Amino acid sequence: MKFVCDKDILESCLNTVSKAADPANVKELLRGIKIDAGEELTFFATDNEISLETFSEATVKEKGSLVIDGRIFADIVKRMPEGSITFETVSQSEIKISGGEVRLSLLYLSAEGFPQMDRVEDGNCISIYSKDLKNVIKYTVFAPDAESTMPILNGIKFEIRNSSMRAVGLNRYRMAIRNQIIPDTGIEYMEFIVPAKTLAELNKILKDDSTIVKITLKDEAVMFEFDRTTVVTRLLEGEFIDYDRLIPKESKIKFKTAYPKIAQSVDRASVIINYDDPKIPVIFDIKNGVLNIDCFTKRGQIHDKISVDTDGELKIGLGAKLLTDAIRAIDTNEIYFEFKDEKSPCKIMPTEGDSFLYIIQPRQL
């Protein structure tokens, strides 16, 4: 096998597929990236849960296939000089790499026995802009609990209704809901649950633009296609939590606040909590039209206040990280906070529309 490829193009491809090459996998093959040199270059990696494939233009002088350690290969290419890099196998186990004045060689494995890309064909298809899917993932993927004993809570539930997409992620302490308008699918209703780990990796390679992402579902797998890149992952099976019953249906106190003010105030309170005990709550004390934000730790205390338009009174404790994660996932200038009492969940939502909803369980004061 022999081919020549521009360093920047090659590095971009490796950054994409290396996310599926598991350096800790007990199977040596699955630590690698498979390279197929044909009419163009194909890069493929899988850990048997997520599979990533991408294509690149290159000057192929001799066709062939091989598997090379993904982490080492990506690190070497990153450190090569700018310009064209030449790759040429010189034996059944060694490939020579040259670029500029640099010459080196690496060992590789035969591609025989490497898993194939199990593409999802003839399933239900929907399309969404890359920037919209990126936002949907970004603003929900933090909510699931990776250490949950309930595997279903390790994923994000997607609900498709004609031209709307809803994504829901939750654990025992919080819930994140994101609603997004998408091109009309003609699908009356469809739901599926994608592992949050897969979505986090997918979000790293999605562009914040109007590139069309095609999503195909069938049986137990989902496939995302965009920019000559394909991502395939298994779906999580089982009944998702009936999240609708977890949403408080009534409230006694509701106030509007500017996003920057509340974000800065909570961030300041989180600092001393992070240096003490993460279980210490941020205290919201609402009275006389003022939101008092307090935090008391062994290392110190902090007090802040924000004027709010509300007549009620309430004192409630909220987890600093839960609150910070939710606030960071907000992309509007003003938000509503809504409470029923000190023992009921806090709701955070936009002042207009229903693009998001965040729910946080209170902490005992």
Image: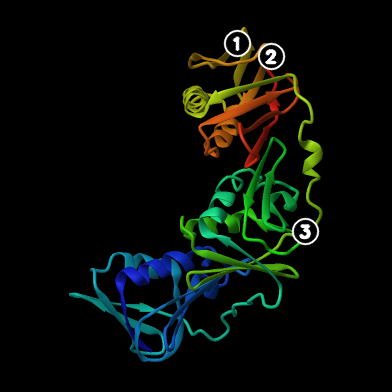
How far is the residue under mark 2 from the one under mark 1? 11 Å
Q: Position of residue 176 (x, y in %)?
A: 65, 41
Density class for disc 2 (Cα within 10 Å; few <14, some 14-19, many ≥20) is: some
| Of the two numbered discs 2 and 3 in the rendering, the one whose residue sits closer to the viewer | 3
Which sits earlier in the primary sequence, circle 2 or circle 1?
1
**Where is mark 3, residue-wise?**
189
Quadrant where the C terminus sits is top right
Q: Amino acid at mark 3?
A: Tyr
- Image coloring type: rainbow
Look at the picture and state if 345 lies above or below 313: below
Q: Does any portion of residue 250 appear in the rendered image? A: yes
Q: Earlier in the sequence, mark 1 or mark 3?
A: 3
Residue 289 is tagged as 1
Percent x, y of residue 255: 63, 21
Question: Up-down: is 260 above or below 48?
Answer: above
Residue type at numbered disc 2: Leu
Is 220 left, or right, of 3 in this rendering?
right
Query: Residues under labels 1 and 3: Cα distance?
Result: 43 Å
Q: Which mark is residue 314?
A: 2
Q: Residue at x 27, y 68 (%)?
A: 80
Confirm whether residue 72 shows in the render: no
Residue at x 70% of width, y 30% of height: 361
Q: Residue at x 70, y 41 (%)?
A: 171
